[in-house]
Amino acid sequence: MKRPDNIAIYIGIAEALFQSEKLPEGGRALAARVFERLRTPSDDGVRHRTRYPACEWLDAALAPFIADDTGFGAAARAIKALEADLGWSRRSSGVNGSDGYTDAHVHGMICGPGGAESRYDVQLGFSLMVPHTRYPDHSHPPEEAYVLFTPGEFRQNGGEWIDPGMGGGIHNVRNNPHAMRSGSAPFLAIWCLLTGGLDVAK
């Protein structure tokens, strides 16, 4: 099959962002495996097109750098170009989430179940949260890597909250409890993981 140009463009941009030295070595290694698998297109045509309230914050999250002549600007423009084709989901379970977090966050799937390229061996997408939102503690079997676009913080294994900064990120090993939270601005982070038949719920 031939991959649509807008998906191919985003994958190329994201691959470079996930190889930044600002990411932990384990996250870069995982991403390399994800993007190696993504060299082969695969799509079963399933689309999760239902939009949720937090989708309306996408423009605000992209706005600070959408005109930038950087990889982040290119990624922002590519996400915007894909908006009509994205698959959307959200979490409704977990502990320690802030009040109303279900409506205050959303996940956009680019490559993965129900996404713009619906497949089940990898996931490539992003998480969006409105200001002052604390995502619940959760874990899942696949390891994953995040790259942060906007101000925000991550927490792993009940430890201290950390802000890796724009372009920085985290690597979650298998079944590693983690969470994230936004400050006074919308939060946007891209992520990738290998599923290989393992169950995962963002």
Image (spheres, rainbow, N blue to C red):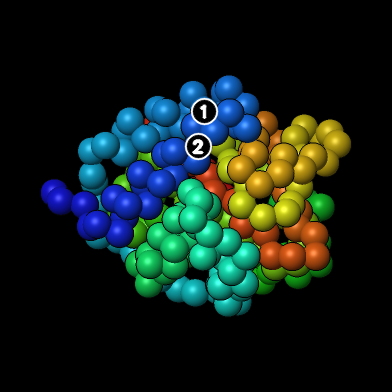
**Residue 55 vertical placement versus 110 (above, below):** below
* In front of the other: 140 or 126: 126
Q: For the view shown, which residue lies furthest in the right direction?
A: 160
**Marks 2 and 1, the one that precedes in the sequence:** 2
Q: Position of residue 129 (x, y in %)?
A: 67, 63
List the single residue furthest toward the front: 69
Residue 61: assigned label: none
Whether residue 90 sits left or right of residue 99 in the image: it is left
Residue at label 2?
A: 18
Is 24 or 37 nearer to us in this picture?
24
Mark pair 2, 1: CA separation: 6 Å
* Type of amino acid under label 1: Arg
Residue 74 placement, left or right of 106: left
**In front: 192, or 163?**
163
Residue beneath disc 1: 28
The answer, for residue 148, to whether it is visible in the render is: yes
Q: Quadrant of residue 165?
A: top right
